[in-house]
Image (tube, grey):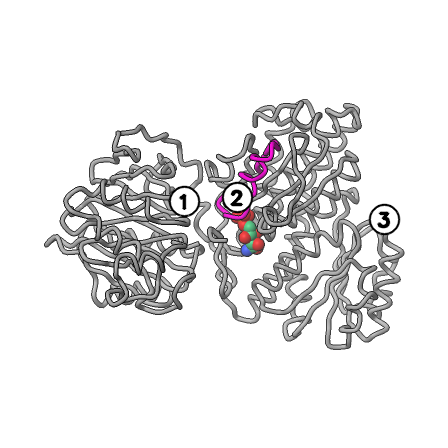
Amino acid sequence: MCGIIGYTGVKEAQEIMLDALEILEYRGYDSAGLAVCGRDGCVRIRKCAGRVKDLRLLCEKDGIQGTCGIGHTRWATHGGVSDANAHPHKFGRVTVTHNGIVENYQDLVQRYHLEEKLKSQTDSEVAAAVLDHFYGTDPLAAIRKTVLKLKGTFALSIMFDDIPGVIFAVRNVSPIVIARARSGSMLASDVTVLGQYSREYFVLPEFYVAVLKEDGVELYDMAGETAEPEWQAVNWDVDRSSKGGYPFYMEKEIMEQPQVIRETVIPRIQGGIPDLSEDGIPDGLLADCKRICVVACGTAMHAGLVGKALMQSLVRIHMDVELASEFMYTDVIVDEDTLVIAISQSGETIDTLEAVKHAKKNGAKTLAIVNVRGASVARASDYVIYTNAGPEIAVASTKAYTTQLAVLYLLTGRMAYVRGIFGAEEAKAFAKELMRVPEVMQKVLDRKEEIHYIARSILNAQDVFMMGRGLDHAILLEGSLKLKEISYIHSEAYASGELKHGTIALITEDTPVVAVVTQEKVKSKEFSNIKEVQSRGAGVILFIKETFGPEKEASWENVFTSVFTLPAMEDGFMVMPASAALQLLAYYVSLDKGLDVDKPRNLAKVVTVE
Ligand code: AGP
């Protein structure tokens, strides 16, 4: 949460930072600000509550010239949304931007007698004050002393008044990546923003200090010894970070799914069989574990639920899916026989990261399914499989989710094969069906206007219920989250059989119900459950596998509010076309309500605080 940017070089820093902050805004959009070291050597700040576009207006009226600066886009934690609480914060000779939470900030306020001196309610300004307290003439010593006093998580970018043209950075847990740009040096919270400036970056190691200058970057450990950065290539196209002509990133990312699923799956099919050897996943890891436990949050956790249904039915292995945020506090049993799979688009979700560390301490083997290369969860895990979704900018996750599913299919197929449950022919048939996903999903995307039409029927709903059984229920949990987060309609996904144990009391003619029916083995029970809600007056929008329908579609007209037929795959793979349809449903509701689809209120793309 919170986006950090820094640039020092030969170009105007303000312009570079404003452009970068617009991309980074998905990390938080409560306020934005920047500090630039002017040509006269003075650091000046522009900041405001609101979006980066508001900051841009401010800078257009009263900009700051200079070639070194730090910027920030905030997701508020300590201190409300206000101009004063916007970053950067300047205290004495020190200016900082901060991502994370300084948990002991109140102790620090007392210890350094800051009560009357602070201008904001943030923990971040306290970090600036402590830095100023320790700063004599040696910036590295001041940073070292300060980080020893801070408890919690932090990514700090720092400028000192008397060291113009230089940016310092240090972090614990919260991410910072650093790049050699063509015209100078840059730092950012994530690599998404760096692609257009540089092809080379490194992840700042925790408790190392980076010193960014116009002509290069130096790295020091806590003892003040120089260290060598581990440079890596930026592997994301600049194009993938743009909207590509779509009104919102979310639509673009939904439409990219066939391509990115193909890019995730095809390199991992060898001789027609799922094969993870290029990812360095030993077959023994999959053959020997006795239990699987997924740790993840939000959408990634929903991907885990689909994985669980697949693994349990095809591999017959015990699998749990744990909310990463609860994992450490609920005494979940993991041991050396457990394979813990951490799923995360960003690879920076703090709860998922902490869950991985906790699992490792308990002897479990850990495998990460991550989208962002080199992200913390990937580095903390024993093994990693990258989803090739490319940058996902919209806060609502779409292509990251379906590429996570694609990896879970690959894992399931490989695991069934190495355990002898699948023979070569079955493994090939499984892989063949998986490779059909992009073309089948494309058929749904080609009919997006049909779903746009259906979306209009729930535009004014206060509450929506979603019902399905088995895999259909797992998909609906995600479909329901998607609808809530971007349309602000209260929505709940229910296992159809559970409705009558309480929730059916809420069903009236004013509560539209979305039903998904794609699984042959529960189809007839599902239809009985649909009748139960219809009998209570609810209008039902039905997403159904095309081969399940009555012979004449006209016979549906009086029975359902709308029907969308999903192109057929084997039941175990129907998750994919159904997911695309539900994503589009949520998207069009949000679009037609005139909401900011990509940046829903109160949310941030990357959740780096507990
Ligand atoms: C997705 O639509 C959500 N905004 C959110 O639930 C997200 O999936 C969750 O925060 C986990 O993020 P991660 O995949 O980056 O770990």
Task: Report which residue position mark 1 lands on.
Answer: 175
Q: Choose top left, top right, bottom left or bottom right for residue 317.
A: top right
Of tags 1 and 2, the one toward the viewer is 2
Q: Is residue 320 visible?
A: yes
Give the CA separation, mark 1 to mark 3: 45 Å
Q: Is residue 112 left or right of residue 82?
A: left
Instruction: State the residue position of label 3.
Output: 520
Query: Per the image, is 55 magenta?
Result: no
Q: Are marks 1 and 3 in contact (CB under 8 Å)?
A: no
Q: Quadrant of residue 290?
A: top right
Question: Which label was assigned to residue 354?
Answer: 2
Q: Secondary structure at mark 1?
A: loop
In the rendered image, residue 263, in percent from the top left (x then y), is placed at: 57, 36
Amino acid type indicated by mark 3: Glu
Q: Residues within 10 Å of mark 2 (few under 14, many from 20)?
A: many
Q: Amino acid at mark 2?
A: Glu
Residue, x 33% and y 63% (percent of image)? 86
Q: Secondary structure at mark 2?
A: helix
- Stretch in magenta: 347-368
Left or right of 198? Residue 572 is right
Give the mark nearer the N terminus: 1 vs 3. 1
Q: Are marks 1 and 2 in contact (CB under 8 Å)?
A: no
Please count the marks in the image: 3
**SS label for mark 3:** helix
Q: Using the image as rendered, state which of residue 177 and residue 191 is in the foreground.
A: 177
Asked if one can make out residue 23 in the rendered structure from this viewpoint, the answer is no
